[in-house]
Image: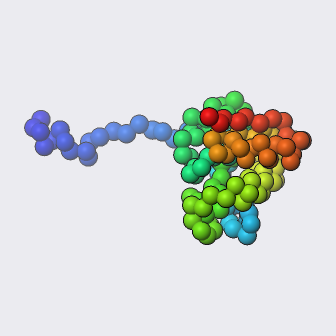
Amino acid sequence: MNACERGNMTHRRNPDITDDSVITTKSTFVADGNTCAATLHAPGSAGGQRLPAILMVGGWGSVQNALTASFVNRFVAAGYAVMEFDFPGWGMSGGWPRQDINPWRRVRAANAALAHLKSQAQVDAHRIVLWGTSFGGGHIVDLAAAHPDLQGAIIQVP
């Protein structure tokens, strides 16, 4: 095999990274008049039962799937439905201005995301935990205080 053949990528075999044990559902909700993108990850073995759930709230510049996959995968493996979302003006969500940081607007969006999560057919609305990292951890404090019915809050803030 010469150097050109070794560099040929046509014979490369990629690993199968599909995961039939996780069902991923894309959806949208409205926050402050903006359509926000959300993704619900649930165990494939749930069999139609209502699951405990975790709402993930990202930090300053966070968008869905940004540094959260390891957390999502572990939570789903433990039997939780996990929802991520993009704040208005970020990621796949609509809204202007883009990449704006307004803490009050973000808390309202997280509240709308929580209501959306509670409305999902596969989610037990009485068994929800909040998870927030960095700037999103601060939003979780406000959100948890406004919703004493939640089961808990995981706040990861430096």
Q: Quadrant of residue 123?
A: top right
What residue appears at the point 68 percent right and 66 percent down from the top-left corner?
35
Decide if residue 104 is in sight here.
Answer: yes
What residue appears at the point 45 percent right and 38 percent down from the top-left corner?
16
Quadrant, the C terminus: top right
- Residue 115 screen position, x and y as percent: 81, 54
- Residue 83 screen position, x and y as percent: 69, 47
Tally of numbered tags? 0
> From the viewer's perspective, is residue 91 above or below residue 118?
below
Outermost residue to the left: 2
Decide if residue 48 is in sight here.
Answer: no
Q: Quadrant of residue 82?
A: top right
Of residues 133 and 19, which is closer to you in this image?
A: 133
Locate residue 123 relative to residue 20 in the image: left or right. right
- Residue 94 screen position, x and y as percent: 62, 67
Locate residue 122 relative to residue 65 in the image: left or right. right
Locate residue 6 relative to residue 23 in the image: left or right. left
What residue appears at the point 56 percent right and 51 percent down from the top-left corner?
61
> From the viewer's perspective, is residue 8 above or below residue 105?
above
Question: How are the colours assigned in the image?
Answer: rainbow
- Residue 51 screen position, x and y as percent: 78, 39
What residue appears at the point 37 percent right and 39 percent down from the top-left corner?
14
Quadrant, the N terminus: top left
Outermost residue to the right: 149
